Image: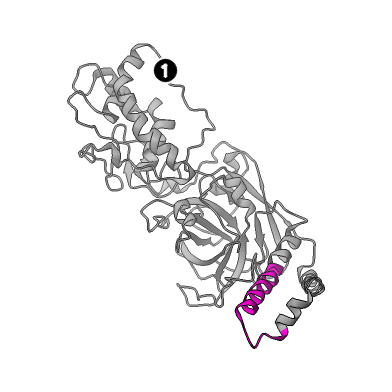
């Protein structure tokens, strides 16, 4: 994507093999797990509510003739419950950039083959959650081989995949925790014969595990508040786990085996994954916008009845009726922004991204447009508009808790060095 061109590049979601979207191929992608650019010094993704944010999108946008922007990617994350509540900072954007010669990637393009595509990756340098690939702070307390960013993701992973392959579970199934030969982990996750609830999640610090981390044993604390699956998971994650604890031994004695997850298994809490492919928008937005605005005004004035015109002429008196007419007229005029938005995107209704570094965003409303953009928090340089996330994204991510009209992203105009990741500014505008 070119820095100085004012042409708008449109992004579209396309399905592809997941291995093609790994870090070494520098992808633009929607959903799935982030393909981190700088593989060290990952950003904190904890929302103010305490949950780990979900990966939404990343845009690969190198800058020509800039020594540290040979590789450059912008990452967007969001906390679905907080986005739904329209909380500040519920969506965040980070910028990462590297020079041609860097400590992670060779200065020649990688061969696009699946074998070896998993390296280099951020997992080579960091403890990452096996569910979402975000920085992790705990491990499975049984096998100590799988890391997690939160107890919610450990429960999700256990139920959907890990319970069938956990080496710690297999060891305990052979000897039992007390050498009794009954090592069913369902008993450990549920309630024991003595009425004490067993351990579920390890909350140790990075690289440390602790089997006594959940000594409190209160399963009601396993709140699975994650995205649109929250009500269903809360029911299945607590009530069903307790039911399984009672019948788990009989279930295994009957020889019933839980089906192992398929190779392309996708965890709940991670959005569907797509590659983002781009093409240049053909229409001339500026001339089209001027004509549309003029025609909308002409059509509006033609549609006004005599009473409305008289009301406008008597605006100085501002009676209750006048104010109501003025309010209705204002709402109709504000709709022009939305009409313009629909007009411009109509040739490409499936666009999920509009990229135009140094250009202007396409607003969905005349209201809630930012009056000023804060300067870069790292170097103090002005920020400029770079891209916007379109509402079509919401249909692909399949989350009822995510909602916006558009999300406009502004980045440092000087592209200052990031030393890992630096937070940029975004403006979320909702439909009025």
Residue at the spot x=28%, y=18% of the render? Answer: 174
Is there any visible trace of residue 23 in the rendered image? Answer: yes
Q: Depth check: 339 or 325 in front?
A: 325
* Residue 216 screen position, x and y as percent: 20, 39
Residue ranking furthest to the bottom:
316
Give residue 273's quadrant in the image: top right
What span is colored magenta in the figure? 313-337
Residue at the spot x=68%, y=70% of the render? Answer: 4
As drawn, 199 above or below 410: above
Q: Secondary structure at mark 1?
A: loop
Residue at the spot x=26%, y=28% of the render? Answer: 188
Dot 1 crowding, Cα within 10 Å, few <14, some 14–19, many 20+: few
* Residue 53 screen position, x and y as percent: 44, 52
Give residue 301's quadrant in the image: bottom right
Residue at the spot x=31%, y=47% of the render? Answer: 206
Q: Depth check: 376 or 231 in front?
A: 231
């Amino acid at each position: 994507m070119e820095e100085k061109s004012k042409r708008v590049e449109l992004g579209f979601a396309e399905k592809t093999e997941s291995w093609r979207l790994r870090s070494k191929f520098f992808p633009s992608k929607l959903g799935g797990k982030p393909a981190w650019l700088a593989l060290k010094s990952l950003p904190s993704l904890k929302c103010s509510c305490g949950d780990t944010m979900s990966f939404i999108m990343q845009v690969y946008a190198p800058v020509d003739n800039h020594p540290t922007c040979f590789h450059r990617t912008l990452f967007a994350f969001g906390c679905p419950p907080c986005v739904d509540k329209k909380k500040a900072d519920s969506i965040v954007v980070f910028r990462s950039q590297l020079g041609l010669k860097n400590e992670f990637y060779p200065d020649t393009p990688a061969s696009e083959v699946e074998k070896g595509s998993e390296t280099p990756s951020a997992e080579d340098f960091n403890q990452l959650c096996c569910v979402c690939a975000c920085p992790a702070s705990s491990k499975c307390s049984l096998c100590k081989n799988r890391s997690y960013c939160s107890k919610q993701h450990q429960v999700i992973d256990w139920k959907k995949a890990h319970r069938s392959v956990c080496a710690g579970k297999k060891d305990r199934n052979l000897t039992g925790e007390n050498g009794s030969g009954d090592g069913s982990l369902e008993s450990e996750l549920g309630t024991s014969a003595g009425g004490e609830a067993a351990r579920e999640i390890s909350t140790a610090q990075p690289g440390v595990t602790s089997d006594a981390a959940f000594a409190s044993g209160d399963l009601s604390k396993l709140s699975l508040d994650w995205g649109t699956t929250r009500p269903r998971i809360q029911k299945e994650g607590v009530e069903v786990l307790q039911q399984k604890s009672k019948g788990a031994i009989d279930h295994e004695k009957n020889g019933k085996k839980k089906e192992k997850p398929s190779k392309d298994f996708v965890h709940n809490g991670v959005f569907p994954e797509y590659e983002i492919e781009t093409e240049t928008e053909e229409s001339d937005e500026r001339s089209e916008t001027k004509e549309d605005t003029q025609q909308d005004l002409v059509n509006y004035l033609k549609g006004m009845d005599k009473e409305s015109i008289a009301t406008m002429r008597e605006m100085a008196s501002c009676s209750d009726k006048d104010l109501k007419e003025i309010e209705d007229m204002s709402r109709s005029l504000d709709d022009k922004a939305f009409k313009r938005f629909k007009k411009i995107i109509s040739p490409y209704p499936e666009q999920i991204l509009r990229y135009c570094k140094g250009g202007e965003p396409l607003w969905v409303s005349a209201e809630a447009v930012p009056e000023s953009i804060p300067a870069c928090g790292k170097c103090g340089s002005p920020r400029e508009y770079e891209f916007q996330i379109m509402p079509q994204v919401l249909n692909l991510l399949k989350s009822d808790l995510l909602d916006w009209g558009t999300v406009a992203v502004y980045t440092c105009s000087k592209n200052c060095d990031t030393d890992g990741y630096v937070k940029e500014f975004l403006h979320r505008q909702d439909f009025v």
